[in-house]
């Protein structure tokens, strides 16, 4: 999928019709992915673009005060240069205001669609611990299971705390280990015991099973949402 660049608003020709064409082409691709229940990275990209345009609208100028936390230093320096070149041109500033006014509701509408799909899938996920949960839940195993098939995908996970100047937030990293086909004599507890025997670095691992009642794309939807559900569950 062709991405919408972080500085799409100020890059190249600043013209309402041109930017409208770029935006609508991008949103059409996003909607096609949402129709297939493919949420990521499209949903997180939409959030970024929407917040950036809100920042432009609220400040009435292209300061992009939040960008240093969201994009690379090189990208930010290019945005600053673009700002310096156009901020003194009232005609360009009026064009940008028109683009922002048009784009915000378009982004919000499809962002709402994406969030509705996210909530629907999240509502159809069930999470529970496997065995006794240890005192340290930040590292262990995630079992990902669709109730429509017998395959259980096994991931090792680690939760990390990130800090910025004014907030803290948690991220989760997963590493795919293997898939296990559950038979009559194979339980989640048995799988956990086998993992503990083979992977000595986690002698008493926290282990959780996330089971989905519906089918959806693994990497674009199920795994990202399962990871967020796991973090929420651990710290609830």
Image (cartoon, grey):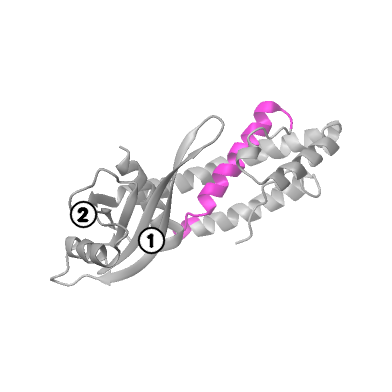
The crowd level at tag 2 (other Cα within 10 Å; few <14, some 14-19, many 20+) is many
Where does the image place residue 89, in percent across and percent down from the top left?
Answer: 86, 33
At 31% from the left edge and 47% from the top edge, which residue is drawn?
123
When asked about the image quadrant of residue 49, the answer is top right
- Quick one: which residue is furthest to the top in this view? 59
At 13% from the left edge and 70% from the top edge, which residue is drawn?
185
The dot on residue 18 is none
Where does the image place residue 62, in percent across and percent down from the top left?
Answer: 73, 34
Where does the image place residue 19, in percent across and percent down from the top left?
Answer: 73, 48
Say left or right for 223 vs 193: right
The dot on residue 130 is 2
- Quadrant of the rendering where the C terminus is positioned: top left
When asked about the image quadrant of residue 205, the answer is bottom left
Region of the chain picked out in magenta, as a range: 34-61
Q: Report the front residue among 68 and 222.
A: 68
Q: Is residue 7 above or below residue 2?
A: above
At 79% from the left edge and 45% from the top edge, which residue is drawn?
15
The dot on residue 216 is 1
């Amino acid at each position: 999928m062709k991405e919408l660049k972080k500085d799409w608003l100020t890059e190249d020709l600043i013209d309402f019709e041109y930017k409208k064409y770029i935006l609508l082409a991008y949103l059409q691709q996003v909607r096609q992915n949402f129709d297939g229940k493919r949420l990521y990275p499209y949903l997180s990209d939409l959030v970024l673009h929407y917040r950036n345009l809100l920042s432009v609208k609220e400040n009435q100028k292209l300061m992009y005060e939040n960008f240093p936390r969201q994009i690379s230093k090189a990208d930010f320096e290019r945005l600053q240069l673009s700002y310096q070149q156009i901020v003194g041109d009232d005609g360009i500033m009026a064009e940008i205001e028109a683009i922002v006014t048009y784009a915000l509701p378009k982004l919000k509408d499809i962002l709402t669609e994406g969030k509705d799909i996210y909530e629907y899938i999240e509502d159809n996920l069930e999470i529970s611990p496997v065995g006794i949960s240890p005192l340290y839940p930040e590292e262990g195993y995630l079992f990902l299971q669709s109730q429509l098939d017998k395959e259980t995908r096994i991931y090792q996970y680690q939760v990390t705390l990130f800090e910025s100047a004014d907030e803290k937030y948690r991220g989760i990293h997963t590493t795919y280990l293997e898939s296990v086909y559950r038979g009559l004599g194979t339980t989640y507890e048995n799988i956990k015991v086998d993992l503990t025997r083979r992977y000595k670095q986690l002698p008493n691992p926290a282990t959780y099973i996330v089971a989905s009642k519906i089918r959806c794309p693994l990497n674009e939807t199920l795994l990202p949402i399962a990871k967020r559900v796991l973090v929420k569950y651990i710290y609830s």
